[in-house]
Amino acid sequence: MALSERALKIIARYNKTDDVIDTTKKFVYEMLEPTPDRGDMLYRYEHSVRVAENGKVIATSEGLPVTDMAVACLLHDVGYRECGDDWPSHPQMSADIAREYLARIDYDPDMAKEIVQGISRHNLTDKLPEDMSIFQMTIRDSDDIDRFDIIRTAMAMGSSVHEKTNVEIIESCNKQIEIARWMMTLKRGTQTAKTMMDKELTQRIELLEQIIAQANKGFSY
Ligand SMILES: [Fe+2]
Ligand SMILES: [Fe+2]
């Protein structure tokens, strides 16, 4: 995808650095640019930092390169603002921005390629390309772990119950449980990621089941 003038201008301000994680954080913040009209970009930035933390945990326990993983995770959603309303194109946009940025800061070319490919594939669910490496899958796993953590669970549960009737609550929670169970069946790159993901999903399912049980009490009068 062609990069905008804005993106190219921001990338041009960056150079080789001693602290690549800190520099990449600044770059992602600048690219997402949380402003009052796009408050969701601050959420996106904080999500990216949490994903990087997940990536570090997995990389450390699985012997993957920790700094490269943190950089990849930080950059995985960097193209969100540039996509405007075309949300589904964000993995490719983020990959294209990451490619330019990593070249600009003189990143190891082989690792840069791996990071870029992993970012472009981070939204894949059940149909994974055969050549998707453990490193690449870990970017996507780290993202999924945050997408199903307790913060997102609270968000999902909020909309499942807010001013809803018992019937609606039960239906909505059952749908969420179905999604969580499906997520549990997806292939993960590592055992560490699988364990982390299962923990989040189990917690989510348990909470949803408690809500369903509570809503069912409404039928007993
Ligand atoms: Fe994403
Ligand atoms: Fe993400």
Image (cartoon, rainbow, N blue to C red):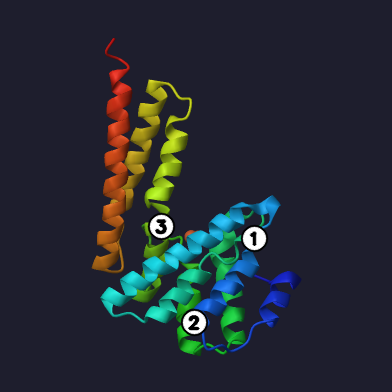
Decide if ligand 2 comes within 8 Å of the CB at mark 3. yes
Residue 89 in the image, given as x and y percentages of width and height: 58, 60
Residue wearing tag 2: 113
Q: Residue at x 69, y 52 (%)?
A: 36
The local crowd at label 2, few if under 14, some if 14 to 19, many if 20 or more residues have their Cα within 10 Å, is: some
Q: Is the residue under label 3 in contact with that under label 2 (CB below 8 Å)?
A: no
Q: Residue at x 33, y 75 (%)?
A: 59
Mark 3 belongs to which amino acid?
Answer: Asp
Q: Residue at x 57, y 67 (%)?
A: 78
220 sits to left or right of 56: left
State the quadrant of the C terminus: top left
| Vertical arrangement, residue 3 with respect to residue 35, above or below | below
Query: Which mark lies nearer to you, 2 or 3?
Result: 3
Mark 1 belongs to which amino acid?
Answer: Arg
* N-term mark: 1 or 3: 1
Q: Is the residue under label 2 in contact with that under label 1 (CB below 8 Å)?
A: no
Decide if ligand 1 comes within 8 Å of the CB at mark 1. no
Residue 217 in the image, given as x and y percentages of width and height: 28, 19
Query: Which mark lies nearer to you, 1 or 3?
Result: 3
Badge number at residue 81: 1
Residue wearing tag 3: 146
Query: Which mark lies nearer to you, 1 or 2?
Result: 1
Residue 52 in the image, given as x and y percentages of width and height: 43, 69
- SS category of the residue bearing label 1: helix
Residue 197 in the image, given as x and y percentages of width and height: 30, 57
* N-term mark: 2 or 3: 2
Separation (CA) of disc 1 from disc 3: 20 Å
